[in-house]
Image (cartoon, grey):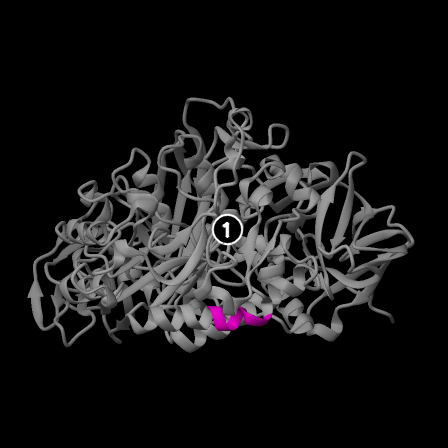
Amino acid sequence: MTIAPAVRIADGKVIVKDRTILTGVPNNVIATSGSSSGPVEGVFIGADFDQPSSSHVVSLGTLRDVRFMACFRFKLWWMAQKMGDKGGDIPLETQFLLVETKDGSHIESDSGDEANQIIYAVFLPLVEGSFRACLQGNAQDELELCLESGDDEIKGTSFTHSLFVSAGTDPYATIFEAIRAVKSHLKTFRQRHEKKLPGIIDYFGWCTWDAFYKEVTQEGVEAGLASLSSGGTPPKFVIIDDGWQSVGVDPRKETSSEENKDNSEEDEPVPRLTGIKENEKFQKKDDPSVGIKNIVNIAKEKYGLKYVYVWHAITGYWGGVRPGVKEMEEYESLMKYPNVSKGVVENEPVWKSDPMKVQGLGLVNPKSVYKFYNDLHSYLASKGIDGVKVDVQCILETLGGGFGGRVELTRQYHQALDASVARNFPDNGCIACMSHNTDALYCSKQTAIVRASDDFYPRDPVSHTIHIAAVAYNSVFLGEFMQPDWDMFHSDHPAGEYHGSARAISGGPIYVSDAPGKHNFDLLRKLVLPDGSVLRPRMPGRPTRDCLFNDPARDGNSLLKIWNMNKYTGVLGVYNCQGAAWSMTERKNIFHPTRPEALTGVVRGRDVHLITEAAVDPTDWNLDCAAYRHRTGEVITLPYNVSLPVSLKVLEYDVFTITPIKVLAPGISFAPFGLIQMFNAGGAIDGLIYQVRSGARVENGSAHGDEMVGKVQMEVKGCGVFGAYSSTRPKRCRVGSKEVEFEYDSGSGLVTLSLDQMPEDSKKVHSVEVEL
């Protein structure tokens, strides 16, 4: 008996577990088994072409009657999500495609039989040799594979491993295993769980960008740190963004008055880096040699910061390194003019006249780029800087001409960057930004944090719902490589709670860009503990399984649900993101008509995909959960598969802590929530042990007399109001060795007690004990 591969091409069809995904596959499309890349069910796909070329497009067949979610680049730098049901809906520059087969049921089979289950197929366009691949649809509903080298001299005719297709019944596991198989094949990158996360991830921070933009000064940095610390939410890291470096513009050419009339935005001179060291704004007036170390010392010694990062572009600055500057000559900077790929230009037409494209960029010679990074980073490290935010990364793909193409240039730069960060910043202090191309992702070995979407734009009302949807869906793909960073935000902003609650469940760093004196401390105290630490969930936040193929920005019907995990609880955020999205016709983000009234969705315990992992003893858990609703303070018990309706208007949100209910005895059950005034309450629970007293007698859900049935021992980080669900009133509660007062609501089962102070210095947690 021959067992057919899970994914195969046969009779002109791409077949996934006996379900046809693509029809009419051309004869020049070829398949290679993925079995050599590990125990994953998948296939590599490529194509043969008649003529050598630096770019190719080939149809992979017709795609219809399925649901898909695509992550595509709507800008050179950034991805967003797009949903649809046919090939023609797939945008240009699609770098990740998840397809749901039309047959099957979402209800899991008790026997594990896949025959009636939904099958998920993941399509990963790759890099092969000097070529980088992406996907797109056409008007005939065909799925097309696009290949390009980025260098007219780098040509190819035959490709065998340009796309990987894999399938499974668990979408998250299928994606993880597919990328692991690609890693085994390419051997050029590492996955998120294999990388060291820098320390900033568990602390609250501040970034100078939206507070000062390029006008940032030492005095401004200190004012921001002092202002945030005054409200009991002290930042423990700061990112000094663009504005600290030594830059200059090219000398102005002589132009006639008639030519000056025609000057447009593209004539604004592009600044270029002119030196490694800081500019005069960040020099101490009475001793310039101290340099940026002055503000670093103030931050760490006066305000107790643990980490100071600075910003720089991957090419040094926006316009690169200026050629002809004496102290920069050793880096052999050469003027290059971006050659932006056709798909990017169609999605982002501004590249036709972008100042960087018109005026060019001073590109450090790839052979000298490690020295450039090492000189820059070793100088910064000597001044006490702990890491860098490396921006403008996708520009490298446009500069590959004469350097072996886009893939090769990107690889050389990233190898140099990784080596310099490893040498100079031992905490792996690096954030990747404007970096959403697969050229970079598939050579990422070191960097562990990646910005997940386009910026937070405080003054752009169209951007806020778009931002939350984009970070969640992009994290489905990006989160396999690095921990997504959902960006800074303003706490004192009409959408501040909307943004802040999402950052709390993102699993990434939490930081604001408030101007000094402009803070909402009530909001910040839901995110930050008095010692500047945060309650971070342990995974990237991602859309729930039932939201993966809905379009919560465009369809007018769907709410977005985002799940994440703590040690002993899950967390679920619900958002109304309707009313604005990127338009495929206008090629920009726009408002579109949507219903002004609230949309209603449902929340279930199993929306937290890995909630079973939060159960202390999964084999003895009946799948019932308790939920704490952050915005109302309600406690709801959720038997397995029971739904709780949630209604939200545009820009409204809610957050639920979801905890497995432990039955200690008939009628006596318990589920801890954590610090219930925090968005991610359950992140506070660091230890949980249930002890059942053998021989205890229980009648009608109550212990016989004053007898103790069992106790719950918990280790709790932080301070504030601790809450839990208990089906019966506890006998007593202790914090440490001391018995403490508690409140019990017999209607909801909510138990609360106060943890007034942070744990003593010698201890990281409170010991909380509840007797039942």
- Give the quarter of the image for residue 306: bottom left
- Give the quarter of the image for residue 280: bottom left
Above or below: residue 349 compared with residue 545: above
Question: Which amino acid is tagged 1?
Answer: Gly
Front-lying residue, 369 or 110: 369
- The residue range painted magenta reads 367-372
Q: Main secondary structure of the magenta part?
A: helix
Q: Residue 684: in sight, yes or no?
A: yes
Above or below: residue 705 compared with residue 141: below
Front-lying residue, 272 or 327: 327
Above or below: residue 125 compared with residue 552: below
The answer to whether 66 appears left or right of 264 in the picture is right
Image quarter hosting the C terminus: bottom left
Q: How many marks?
A: 1
Front-lying residue, 65 or 357: 357
Q: Position of residue 201 (x, y in %)?
A: 35, 62
The answer to whether 256 appears left or right of 672 in the picture is right
Image quarter hosting the N terminus: bottom right
Secondary structure under tag 1 reads loop
Q: Identify the residue shown where x is 23% and y is 53%.
A: 221
Q: Position of residue 752 (x, y in %)?
A: 17, 54
Q: Position of residue 716 (x, y in %)?
A: 22, 65
Front-lying residue, 34 or 770: 34
Residue 694 part of the magenta segment: no
Q: Residue 663: in sight, yes or no?
A: no
Q: Which residue is mark 1?
A: 319
Q: Identify the residue shown where x is 36% and y is 38%.
A: 653
